[in-house]
Amino acid sequence: MKLQTLLSILFYGGLVCGFLSCTGNPHSLRARKEALGKLIFQDTQLSEPAGQSCATCHTIANGFADRDSRMVSEGAVAGLYSQRNAMTICYSMYVPSLYFDEGEETYVGGLFWDGRSPSLQNQAGEPFLNPVEMGNPDTCAVVMKIRRAPYYSELVCIYGETSNVDSLYAHSTDALVAYQQSDEVNPFSSKYDAWEKGKYTFTDSELRGMNLFKDKGMCAECHVLDKDERAGRVLFTDHTYDNLGVPRNPENPHLRVPADYFLLTSDSIDLGLGAIVSKEEENGKFRVPTLRNIALTAPYGHNGYFKTLREIVHFYNVRDVSDEFPSAEYPATINRDELGNLELTPEEEADLVAFMETLTDGFKLALKQQKP
């Protein structure tokens, strides 16, 4: 009798604990979704073949860009490469859906370099099914793997049990969204943020760089210094599109993938936004990325042409007055108003880089720097 009573207590107690753990307060639920999303984000068993996760191309140590700092990332299948450099996912939660701004006469927003994805959840689901990324044939294949994952019980606890493949896929991508919206991915913890709060003093070089960024360097024309309405912080982007005149990258391994996986035009040009909105005047334009964590996310440009931050700053400075760089991949729509002949000295280029290096998250104040 005593044993039966004990078993009853354990059984019903387990049910109650399980119920409470699945129906906690909203803050706790949010934290659990974020933790689940991180597990899915880091799961190398969700690719085909296994071995690649979201974190392979978006690792925290590199500002959530490619783990190995490759110009473009190799997919789960050896020898298959994307056509573009892996963008950071930092602060992507603040990118609006793609729309045309009638007043400014420009496209704004949309996820990925070309704006093709309207939301974080849509974006989170694409890499699993991309043949040159995680390589799964369909959502069923992904869901089967998720059902076998050690975190599956937590997913059921949070979202409920379902036999519907689309629903389970949506639950998984919703958890990924929660992680992408977490403080870990959007920490606002750079020197710049400390400076804004009055807790850090820029060095002379950093201060000169900020002034150049606003004025002579014309960087703030697109990497704006106004606070974003949704974030309430400076995101260093206006989410618009531009053709910077980036050269074709002959080292891009995507140029050598089999024809069935080739994603550029027949003459190896990446049309960017133009291919999404079907407008020739938008060809060769790509979304202006945030500069937060820019020092961690080399190489640079949609095709990874520029190996260092100093190199791309120099390109912005002298593109139109030097023979140091090849011609643009798509010349017709180049921005010639805000870059190409900035007349910056080598010292000013270095100061600009110094300022952009203050945008790296994870800054810790030394005791002597801390202000009351």
Image: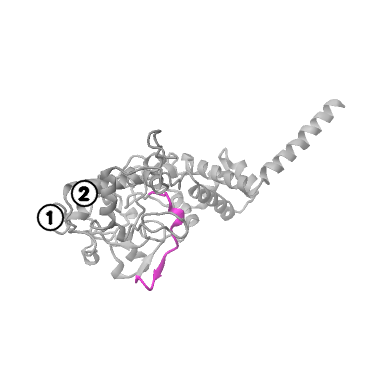
Tell me which corner region of the image, top left, top right, bottom left or bottom right, holds residue 367: top left
x%, y% of residue 129?
45, 52
Mark 1, residues whose alpha carbon is within 10 Å: few (<14), some, or many (≥20)?
few
**Residue in the foreground of this view, choosing between 244 and 7:** 244
Instruction: Specify the quadrant of the image occupied by residue 281.
Output: bottom left
The verdict on residue 339 being magenta is no
Rendered image: mark on residue 349: 2
Of the residues shown, which amino acid type is indicated by label 2? Glu
Q: In the rendered structure, which amino acid carries the disc numbered 1?
A: Ser
Left or right, 299 with reference to 238: left
Residue 277, image x, y percentages: 37, 68
What label sits on residue 13 in the rendered view? none
Asked whether the beta carbons under mark 2 and mark 1 sit within 8 Å of each other, the answer is no
Residue at point 12%, 55% (across, down): 322
Q: Identify the coloring.
A: one colour
In the image: residue 141, left or right of residue 331: right
Q: Quadrant of residue 223?
A: bottom left
Q: Quadrant of the C terminus?
A: top left
Residue at the bottom extreme of this rendering: 102
Of discs 2 and 1, which sits in the foreground?
2
Q: Residue furthest top?
A: 2
- Judged from this view, the residue extending furthest toward the right is 1
Secondary structure, mark 1, is: loop
Above or below: residue 340 compared with residue 34: below
Name the residue at 29% across, 42% down.
203
Distance from label 2 to label 1 (Cα)? Answer: 15 Å
Residue 284 location in percent, x, y?
A: 28, 62
Q: Which residues are magenta?
A: 88-105
Nearer the N terminus, badge 2 or badge 1? Answer: 1
> Residue 48, can we see it?
no
Residue 322 is tagged as 1
Q: Is residue 104 one of those drawn in magenta?
A: yes
